Image (cartoon, rainbow, N blue to C red):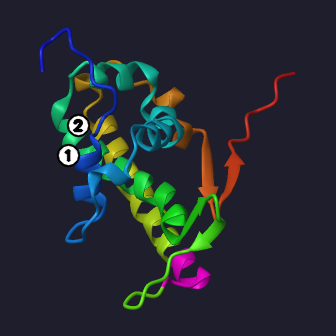
Amino acid sequence: MRRNEMMNSLITAREAAEIAFPGQFMGCEAISEATIAAAEQRFIVPVVGERLYRRMLEGAYRMLRTEYLAPALALWVKLSMLPSMAVQSGEMGVVELESGVLKGAGEEKLDLLCRRTRCEAAAMLRRAVAHIEARAEEYPEYCPQENVLNRCVIGGGVVFAERRPEHG
């Protein structure tokens, strides 16, 4: 990539498919740029901060992007896609996919897969943060105070905000 070229996202649809769906057929055309961008804005930017994110889009910190953040981002993309993979919507309304050979997973199995994917994605993101924070001098754009994971805890889908001392 040339220095003045900027990426649209930290990973491509092909990379997301290869990382999130290993050994499975998942055409990269099934993963939209909007899905990747939404996952970046929802899960990556609040953790690494806007400045570090922008530098990576400019092409900086390739190893951080490919080895640490790409696996987490691909799993967040997968998580956002799973519900729509179980059902389709269109002129016939919202319908389940069925064929003579394959049967759609039930709601309980889909929920289990979503929970497992969420746990894996969160673990990969914590791994990336540990890498960044252990090498703070290599990533001057990173600000630990901006990292949402340093300000709150998320458990069971509930966000517990940090309790700040009262001034008075």
Q: Amino acid at mark 2?
A: Leu
Tell me which segment is drawn in magenta: 104-112
In the depicted view, which residue is nearer to us: 125 or 166? 125
Farthest residue, direction right: 168
Farthest residue, direction bottom: 100
Residue in the picture at 37% in, 90% down: 101
Residue in the picture at 53% in, 62% down: 84
From the image, tell me which residue sits under label 1: 67
- State left or right for residue 133 relative to residue 87: left
- Measuring from the top left, give residue 113's x and y in whole percent: 47, 75
Q: Considering only vertical position in the picture, is 118 above or below 142?
A: below
Rendering quarter of residue 87: bottom right
Q: Is residue 111 magenta?
A: yes
Rendering quarter of residue 152: top right
- Measuring from the top left, give residue 106's x and y in whole percent: 57, 85
CA distance separating discs 1 and 2: 6 Å
In the depicted view, which residue is nearer to us: 76 or 155? 76
Is label 2 in a helix, a strand or a loop?
Answer: helix
Q: Amino acid at mark 1?
A: Glu
Q: Quadrant of the N terminus?
A: top left
- State left or right for residue 103 relative to residue 25: right
Q: Main secondary structure of the magenta part?
A: helix
- Measuring from the top left, give residue 114's x and y in whole percent: 51, 69
In the depicted view, which residue is nearer to us: 66 or 168? 66
Q: Is residue 7 magenta?
A: no
- State left or right for residue 14 relative to residue 115: left
